Amino acid sequence: MSFSDSDSSSYGGEYKNFRQISRERLLHEMLRSAKSGDSKSTWKVLIMDKLTVKIMSYACKMADITQEGVSLVEDIYRRRQPLPSMDAIYFIQPTKENVVMFLSDMSGKAPLYKKAYVFFSSPISRELVTYIKKDTSVLSRIGALREMNLEYFTIDSQGFVTDHERALEELFGDEEDSRSGDACLNVMATRIATVFASLKEFPYVRYRAAKSLDVTTMTTFRDLIPTKLAARVWDRLTHYKQKIEHFPQTETCELLILDRSVDQIAPIIHEWTYDAICRDLLNMEGNKYVHEVPSKSGGPPEKKEVLLEEHDPVWLELRHAHIADASERLHEKMTNFISKNKAAQIQHGSRDGELSTRDLQKMVQALPQYSEQIDKLSLHVEIAGKINRIIRESGLREIGQLEQDLVFGDAGMKDVIKFLTTKEDASRENKLRLLMILAAVYPDKFDGEKGLNLMKLAKLPEDDMNAVNNMRFLGASTDSKKSSTGTFSLKFDIHKKKRSARKDRVGQEETQWQLSRFYPMIEELVEKLSKGELSKDEYPCMNDPSATFHGAPHVASTIQAPTPHSMRSRRTATWARPRNSDDGYSSDSVLRHASSDFKKMGKRIFVFIVGGATRSELRVCHKLTNKLQREIVLGSTSLDDPPQFITKLKLLTAHELSIDDLQI
């Protein structure tokens, strides 16, 4: 089974990002390659299973697929109409069930299709290849039988998931089942390895080592998750080295494997950037946002579904901006549009005083000739307005400030108790999230009766207490685990009156926007990895590289090295910089980086988090890509917003329940 070569490593030719390479492989290497010279019809049928249809839909649009000659997309498990004059492309997982269905389609005297081009999403076993070869009637009808090695969902230009929504429950639950855990890790490793097969990259594989308190402490399956996963990924990569044509024989990039215990706070804390806060507060279904638009017939408003994704230039520019900054920029854009439009100016002139963004939006909507230009802008004005209204009505700024003060050691138990007693109208979810952050910083405050008393004070049900208690399953902390006396994992210097999960750095300027102080732990880890400063004891390497590779910094960095034993350090958020700064997120900066900087990129860095990644971690990967001039790709078992993550935490001890039964 050959594997056609494409120039997709970090070197040579025009630089393409992670999603672009994945998309082009599916469209060109798979769909386009199935165009045979002897076929009278250029149109094909594309047949997929439940997983591969998702792989395709994350990477490509239907229009892309049609352009490559596909006129019909079918589910392999549905009854299908025979089309004996057409060729079929099968993009399927290499399972026995799928192979049986394919052979059933193409065998006998009346096959469903003229010729079959079969592409497997991951390596197929020898047994299944032998099984296919046994059916001689099918062999002459097979135009291609190949391994695509592409079995992941490209959720972002620099992000992917392996579709393990229940990884947290299967791997970190209170009843350890090593057999199902191993099976989960095996599939995960196969899918991660296909990322490197697709990009023709061979990584140094680093992983977070298991930590135990002392030699007498038993290491659990949970402690060894990154170690086990790294070993399995390494095994599949060495197989690819021997099997795939033009696969690199020396290391071309770096992979860091972590699990959710590396940062318990990032999935829970309120993240104030536009993308994250949309998902957190607006009950969106995936990328789908439903809003009301004026009826063209003059009737009541109509509901319209829109997708917030990279094809929307306004979304692309603002998604990583602080919500306050995004709101300001939207107002500026509306004002600029009005000032450049004569018809709008006439309407504007008939009014007195300063116009609000909402007034501007209504005015522009009344100009049908500009509807295409303004639709996106108008949509985001509405979304930002709705978010700001929710923040105001729910008192979220005060909650957000307390969360960040807790994380940075500027607030403690007394502040939380004061909040719970004076802000009884705070929502159940916000109180729960506050207590979970408290539990991460002050684990001993939740021992025995203390935790129950806090939950009573917050008036939260027992169901919510499970979410707090289950944080203990996200095990190992960093340096200071030995200094702890509590049952939770994030342990700190017990002599301090107020503890912190992150520390401010000396000499950093104050941020322009409130609540932009928090940063995810992976920001620090990726920077250390890039500079060759990541501890080899805490993060060993499967390849055991020479000291020269990790010893020399890849790029010069102005970040000050953290002081010994500090767990986190203050970063200045990108939205805190002056408007004309090169923050990587303003529209000018986005265009500039897209056009030039990718051409001079260094080696890629991949970070994989078992147990779910967060929007803030994805944002950090984009930020560091611009800063380090290395494409940072984030992978995970799933991408979770806070409500989803909390529900999954509850499931760690709720074996009789399903995700649908638990609401927060």
Image (tube, rainbow, N blue to C red):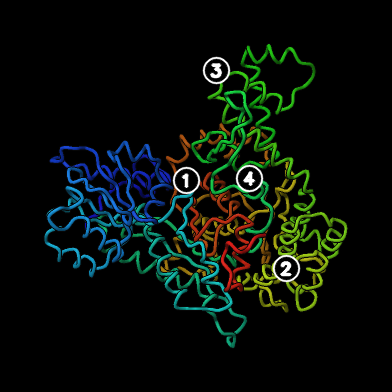
Disc number for residue 439: 2
Mark 2 or mark 1: whose residue is earlier in sequence:
1
Q: Nearer the viewer, mark 4 or mark 2?
A: 4
Q: Is residue 258 left or right of residue 93?
A: right
Mark 3 or mark 4: whose residue is earlier in sequence:
4
Judging by the rendered image, the residue that carries numbered circle 3 is 369
Above or below: residue 367 compared with residue 37: above
Mark 1 or mark 3: whose residue is earlier in sequence:
1
Mark 4 or mark 2: whose residue is earlier in sequence:
4
Q: Position of residue 42 (x, y in %)?
A: 21, 37
Q: CA distance from mark 3 to mark 4?
A: 30 Å
Look at the numbered disc 4 and give the secondary structure of its residue. Answer: helix
Q: CA distance from mark 4 to mark 1?
A: 19 Å
Quadrant in the picture for the C terminus: bottom right
Look at the numbered disc 3 and give the secondary structure of its residue. Answer: helix
Judging by the rendered image, the residue that carries numbered circle 4 is 278
Disc number for residue 483: none
